[in-house]
Structure formats: C-alpha cells, structure tokens
Image (cartoon, helix red, strand yellow):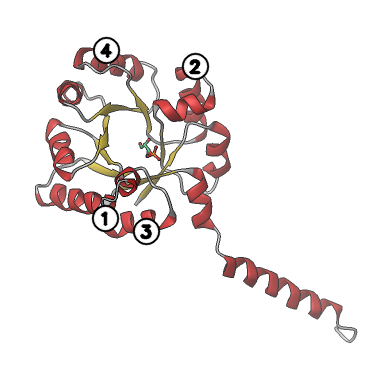
Amino acid sequence: MKIFLDTADVAEIRAFADLGIVDGVTTNPSLVAQTGRKDLPGLIREIADVVHGPISVEVIATDAEGMIREAREISAWGLPTVVKIPMTREGLRAVRVLSEEGIATNVTLVFTALQGLLAAKAGATYVSPFAGRLDDIAHDGMEVVRDLVHILRVYGLPTQVIASSIRHPLHILEAARAGAHVATVPPKVLGQVLRHPLTDAGIERFLKDWQALQNRENNP
Ligand code: E4P
C-alpha cells in the first residue's frame, strides 16, 4: 500500500521525506489555508521538490467548466499534480473530460461505495472515500473503503482507492487489510505508527546492558 501525506505543510513533509515511506501528498483548500500561503503554485512546487510522487491539488470551482479550466491551469504548472474534483454531478462531467485529456484526477468527498463506482466509471485516476468523517457520524467509514476496493477489483476498473480522512493508526491497518491502493495519512498519525513503547524500552535496555559490559573492571 502506498502512503501519501495528508498535509500542505512543507516542514511536516520534509520531516518524513527521507524515510523512504512517502509516495505522494494530498492537499485540500482547508489544509492549504492552515499554511497561510496564498501562492498555491509556489507552495506545490516546494512540495514537489521534497516528495517525488503525485500531489493532489483541489479545484475551487463548483461547475464543470470552471473545474476543467482550473484543472488545465494546475496541470500547466508542469508538476506531478493530480487534480482533486469533488464528487458531484458537475464533478463527474469534469472528470470525464479531463480523463480524455490525460489529466489525472482524484475524486474527493466520497462517502459511499456507489459514489466511488460512479467516479471510477467517469474515468477518475483515484477516488477518496473519507473514512474518518463517516466514523464521526456513527457510520463505518472503513466499510466503504472495503466495498469500493472489492467492487473496482470485480469489474477490473483501474481507478485507485485512497483511504482518506485517516484519524488514527488502526485506520491505516484496516486500509491495508482492505487492499486500498493508498492511505493518505496526517503526519501526526504517521508519527504515531512509527513509534512503539516496547521499541523504545528495548533500545534503552540494550544500551544499558552494553554500557554495563564496558564498565566491568576486568573487561579485556
Ligand atoms: C483527503 O484527500 C482529504 O484531504 C483528507 O483526508 C480529509 O481529512 P479530514 O476529514 O481529517 O479533514
């Protein structure tokens, strides 16, 4: 399973970039707003310098023509961008046109497996079911991820599923078990996965035992 970082914060991305575990980045207007940066092309260029993989950038328009126009502008930056399109009727119209033009898309704000199926049929490169936001309203978000992976596999559709709105490490484990192609993970959650108290305790004990050996007086 690929791991994308779900953030627009270049410093946070840099902190994970040299570990060999980050395959791409997803942003959205809220994540960009958190950075306070208004020069979107400049921000995405900085991210592209750090991570060599697809970077999702979301359109602001809500009508198909506006989304297509924005998508063409984004792909003209000459960066490895994927254009994020909201899962609406207008969004699907845009995805169909963009897929014919060879512009990669990520259909976002997917909350049912059937929405994901429609996005895949329209030609989406990626679909992003939002697991955490479904959990928030007492629906099983990971069930949508599982169903979608299964359905796309049954019909041989090439669209990749990005398990999104990841809130905790168990979401990542469930996404991997479901066979999701990608999980897009906030840096804080990826940091939680990296560490384990038994690893820390194990290192401490090894170092203590090693030091005790060095301190032995009759040590040759
Ligand atoms: C994915 O592409 C979205 O940007 C993201 O996963 C949304 O997560 P949230 O529900 O925590 O805002």
Q: Which residue in the protein does label 2 denote?
A: 38
Choose mark 1 or mark 3, whichever is in front.
Answer: 3
Amino acid type indicated by mark 3? Leu
At x 15%, y 51%, the residue is 153
Is residue 218 shown above or below 43?
Answer: below
Q: CA distance from mark 1 to mark 4?
A: 34 Å
Amino acid type indicated by mark 1? Gly
Q: Which mark is residue 69?
A: 4
| Marks 2,4: beta carbons within 8 A | no
Q: CA distance from mark 3 to mark 4?
A: 38 Å
Residue 7: horizontal and vertical position, in percent?
A: 46, 35
Q: Which residue in the protein does label 3 denote?
A: 173
Q: Which mark is residue 179?
A: 1
Q: Earlier in the sequence, mark 2 or mark 4?
A: 2
Is residue 154 shown above or below 48?
Answer: below
Choose mark 2 or mark 4, whichever is in front.
Answer: 2
